[in-house]
Amino acid sequence: MSQPENLGKIWRRYKLSKRTLRKTMDYVKKEYKRTRIMPASWYLSSYNFKFNIAHMKPFLEKLKQKKLVGLQCSSCNRVFFPPRQVCGKCLVKPDRWVDLRETGRVASYTITYLKDPESGEVLERPIICAQLDGADTSYPATLSPDVEFKDTYIGMPIKVHWAEDISGGMMDIEYYDLTEDDAKDLELRKE
Ligand SMILES: [Zn+2]
């Protein structure tokens, strides 16, 4: 078995900058010496998992005030909305909050089939990946009930529709409204 590589060597292999290096958490795989093997059964369903959302706190506080913030990685400058605990590219903790607007675009979308519990009618509803202006990531969200699947397209301009009761959670953004796309009416100049 080879000796664990020293970290400096690993950083060089991953081509991380000095700045990233300082902030990087210990996520890069190290090689461990194998000692012995113990066969056993693991009952994963009996485990309790703890999910730390401490990094979400300022974000949720802002939601309560109907304000949107993203978390920026100070190494690659990508802005995460919703905030992420670790930047997957640089392996550092994003640590800069930035204001975001309520507007954005449909980054991707797909169809869902919802059965109306009363009439039994199956409704075709679009589900979207919403990317807010100023954010580099998108997340699954719903569109206004007024917008049909056939009218949805990638790049469609959207705006946050706040829920009536604000509780400081992701559900505060009830859905996204379609905003006017004024440029749509412009005709291409014909020579
Ligand atoms: Zn990064």
Image: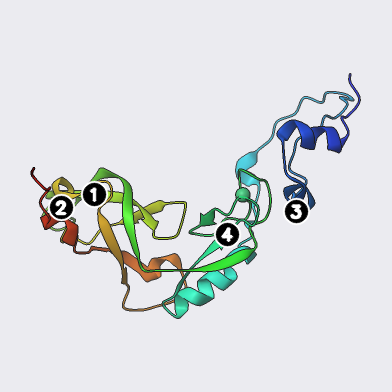
The total number of labels drawn is: 4
Residue occupied by mark 3: 23
- Between the C-alphas of marks 3 and 4, the distance is 14 Å
Amino acid residing under circle 3: Lys
Residue occupied by mark 1: 126
Q: Nearer the viewer, mark 2 or mark 4?
A: 4
Counting from the top left corner in percent of width and height, residue 68 is at 45, 70
Direction from residue 37 to residue 74 in the image, left or right: left
Label 1, residues with CA under 10 Å away: few <14, some 14-19, many ≥20: many
Q: Earlier in the sequence, mark 3 or mark 4?
A: 3
Q: Secondary structure at mark 2?
A: loop
Residue 117 lies in quadrant: bottom left
Q: Which residue appears farthest toward the top when viewing the image?
A: 1
Residue occupied by mark 2: 148
Kindly check if marks 2 and 1 are in contact, taking CB atoms under 8 A apart as contact: yes
Amino acid residing under circle 2: Glu
Q: Does mark 1's beta carbon lie closer than 8 Å to ligand 1?
A: no
Counting from the top left corner in percent of width and height, residue 184 is at 15, 55
Residue occupied by mark 4: 72
Counting from the top left corner in percent of width and height, residue 79 is at 52, 57
Amino acid residing under circle 1: Pro
Q: Earlier in the sequence, mark 2 or mark 3?
A: 3
- Between the C-alphas of marks 2 and 4, the distance is 34 Å
Label 3, residues with CA under 10 Å away: few <14, some 14-19, many ≥20: some
Residue 103 lies in quadrant: bottom left
